[in-house]
Amino acid sequence: MYVAILFNLAVVTPVFAVDLNAPAEKTVTVGSEIARGYTAVDHSTDRIYDLLDVQFAISNRLATEKERNTDTDAFYLGAYYNAWREMKGLVAVASSPQFRHLNSEEVLKESDQATAVFFRDFRKEQAQLHIDDATFYQAVLPAMPSANPSFDVTETAFKEWDAKVGLTN
């Protein structure tokens, strides 16, 4: 009986010869790089709430990607977008009356300026890649958490920040 079971397993389980020296291929797309950049910033800032620590974590992650030569324009597009998004939210919370006492005016101002730089860099990468807002939003959507803003909310925020940093005509 045991021999029959072992024989059946041997017959059912096919064995394939694999060339271990064959190159492994992974298709890298603009969309996958945008998502990778977004996720990289997300992971580097996970559970960090201090404004200066978040800026430091983002800068370190971008430097690491550059050092490893794994940075692409599309990676930066996703990374700068999420850096702007993260900082924008943290600065808004830190500036609120209940948390304002935790940060000096200087830290809030520096953080707001860093947020503006991330937004400008995001828009610069977006222009270089010729990706409009709607296409970008569709590319980054899979990397975003399920509680993501609608495109209308995102587009409104883009317009507000375009005006804030002087990118509108």
Image: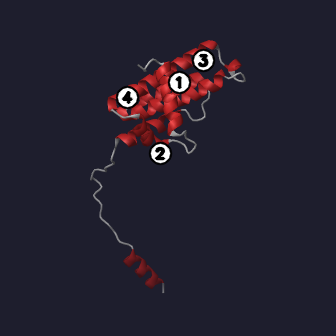
User: Residues under labels 1 and 3: Cα distance?
Assistant: 12 Å
Residue 84, position as x, y percentages in the image: 50, 28
| CB-based contact (under 8 Å), mark 4 and mark 1 | no
Query: Marks 2 and 4, how far apart in space?
Result: 20 Å
Q: Amino acid at mark 3?
A: Leu
**Nearer the observer, disc 1 or disc 3?**
3
Q: Is residue 70 visible in the rendered structure shown here?
A: no
Query: Does label 2 or label 4 sit earlier along the sequence?
Result: 4
- Left or right of 88, for residue 36: left
Sequence-first disc among 1 and 3: 1
Compared across the picture, whether 33 is left or right of 115 comes to left
Q: Callout 3: few (<14), some (14-19), or many (20+) C-alpha neighbours within 10 Å?
A: many
Foreground: disc 4 or disc 1: 4
71 or 137: nearer the viewer = 137
Task: Mark 2: give few (<14), some (14-19) or many (20+) Cα within 10 Å.
Answer: few
Does residue 31 appear anywhere in the picture?
yes
Residue drawn 29% across the image and 64% down it = 17
User: Where 101 sits versus 20, above or below?
Assistant: above
**The residue tagged with tag 3: helix, strand or loop?**
helix
Residue 55 is tagged as 1
Of labels 1 and 2, earlier in sequence is 1
Image vertical order of residue 4 relative to residue 62, above or below: below
Type of amino acid under label 1: Gln
Q: Which mark is residue 138?
A: none
Q: Give residue 10's position: percent from left, percent from top.
A: 39, 76
What colouring style does the render use? secondary structure
Residue named by callout 2? 142
Q: Dot 3 corresponds to which residue?
A: 108
Q: CA distance from mark 1 to mark 2?
A: 24 Å
**What's the amino acid at mark 2?**
Pro
